[in-house]
Image (tube, rainbow, N blue to C red):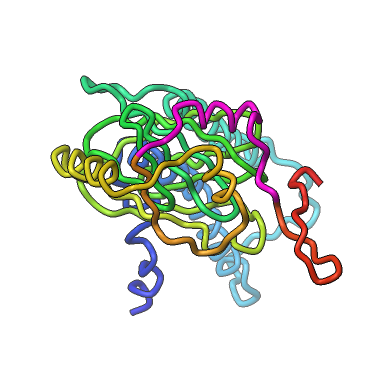
Amino acid sequence: MCAPLVLAACGNGVLNPRGPVGAAQMTILIDSLAIMLSIVIPTIVAIVAFAWWFRASNARARYLPDWEFSGKIELVVWAIPSMVIILLGGVTWLGSHALDPAKPLPSTKTALEIQIVSLDWKWLFIYPEQGIGSVNQLVVPADTPLHFSLTSASVMNAFFIPQLGSMIYTMNGMVSSLNLQADEPGTFAGLSAHYSGEGFSDMHFETRAVAAPEFDTWIANAKRNGSRLDESRYATLSRQSIADPVTLFGSVDPALFHRIVMQGVPPGPGPAAVVDGASLPVNAEH
């Protein structure tokens, strides 16, 4: 009766993957759990068995009050944990190399390039090949490799789409690389997985994986109805705000992401200090 309550939150999480990276990471989690349970379960059973066998009323139990050492017991005590560590280490080693975030995914299709900037407290997605951008909405073609280049306009943050896998950090002045893929159309929750201030709890976004024709339609709609994102508009966007609505940009300055990374445009201004009733920006570096 309690199982539905325990499993109620698993629908949109890492145990319900919708991409090759997420599926591989779920396999690692399950394999690691199975390896650890191989020693945990026998230990629990042994505790119960020993308690029952050496109960006060069992006259058949053999007591050895002067016993000090047993080579056989020492072998078991050290060998089993050693094998568990070796197996877990092997799983971790192989998984870390196979699922390197910067490693391109095997596919016959060309990866879609997406540039991501974490701001306070919103996500900016730039599609350099299509020349458009969006805030708090990531739309991608299903069954197509995705290559993300990520940076931060302010403090360190963490980009995470649990059903697609591989959380990765974003930092000001540098670029992180991440390769993911959605195997099928669907809507997946994206979020910030690193506390970054007052608006952290609302720093989430919707990830929509759609068929290729629908993706082309979304691109055309953004170009037709979206405004232009240049340095002036970006300066306004970088100010701290909470629970921003989805915004589309029909054109994006091609050099904007590079200038953000190289700090050609200043970092996010950070919180405002009130002095004599007036709000003054506080530099994010301080």
Residue 74, percent from left and from top: 67, 38
Give percent across and percent down for residue 53: 56, 66
Q: Name the side, left or right, on which 75 lies relative to 141.
A: right
Count all numbered tags in the image, as a single digit: 0
| Quadrant of the image containing the N terminus | bottom left
The quarter holding residue 55 reads bottom right
Task: Tell me the residue at 42%/37% (across/down).
Answer: 126
Residue 159: horizontal and vertical position, in percent? 50, 44
Determine the residue positioned at 70% across, 40% down. Answer: 70
Q: Which residue is drawn at 50% across and 26% down?
A: 255
The residue nearer to you, when weighing 272 against 169, is 272
Give the quarter of the image for residue 249: top left
Q: Identify the residue at horizontal 36%, vertical 55% (top origin).
A: 206
Position in image of residue 234 (x %, y %): 54, 43
Residue most toward the left? 213
Residue, far right = 276
- Residue 35 colored in magenta in the image: no
In the image, residue 176 sits, relative to residue 243, either above or below, namely above
Q: In this view, does 258 lie above or below 214?
A: above
- On the rendered structure, is 38 left or right of 58? left
What is the magenta range? 251-269
- Reply above or below: 62 against 253: below
Taking the image as shown, residue 25 lies to the left or right of residue 70, namely left
Give 141 or 227, whichever is nearer the viewer.
227
* Residue that protrudes farthest toward the bottom in the picture: 1
- Name the residue nearer the viewer: 18 or 190: 190
